[in-house]
Image (cartoon, rainbow, N blue to C red):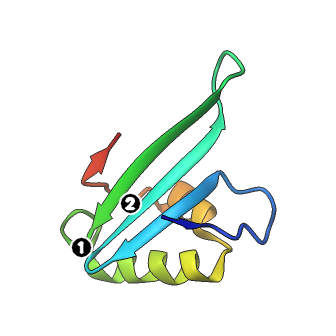
């Protein structure tokens, strides 16, 4: 996975992997009890739509705005682990 540049300095996105019709994003932050918690989400053309995925890929490569976009739009994901 590629390290997210986080140009704004306040994103919970840590890594992403852009491939074909999908993008995989790893988020991390502080859990309820103070420990570090991370989750990986996979978004696909099928789950979120091609225009959404392509826009998310462009935000990821720019290193700014991806976390805000996901929080605001809440695109459907195909898998989470």
- Residue 34 shown left or right of residue 14 in the figure: right
N-term-proximal mark, 2 vs 1: 1
Q: Nearer the viewer, mark 2 or mark 1?
A: 1
Residue 9 image offset from top left, x and y in percent: 81, 61
Q: Please name the residue shown 55% across and 75% down the image.
A: 60
Location of mark 2 (residue): 75
Q: Secondary structure at mark 1?
A: helix
Q: Which mark is residue 45?
A: 1
The residues tagged by marks 2 and 1 sit, at their Cα atoms, a distance apart of: 11 Å
Residue 32 image offset from top left, x and y in percent: 64, 20
Q: Please name the residue shown 63% across and 82% down the image.
A: 62
Which residue occupies the extreme front position in the image? Answer: 1
Q: Is residue 60 above or below residue 58?
A: above
Q: Is residue 26 above or below residue 48?
A: above
Q: Please name the residue shown 55% across and 55% down the image.
A: 71
Q: Is residue 7 above or below residue 55?
A: above
Q: Say which of 66 and 75 sits in front.
A: 66
């Amino acid at each position: 996975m590629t390290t997210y540049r986080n140009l704004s300095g306040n994103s919970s996105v840590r890594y992403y992997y852009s491939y074909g019709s999908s993008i995989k994003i790893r988020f991390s932050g502080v859990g309820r009890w103070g420990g570090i918690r991370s989750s990986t989400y996979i978004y696909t053309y099928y789950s979120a739509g091609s225009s959404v995925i392509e826009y998310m890929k462009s935000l990821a490569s720019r290193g700014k705005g991806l976390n805000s976009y996901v929080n605001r739009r809440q695109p459907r994901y195909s898998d989470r682990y």
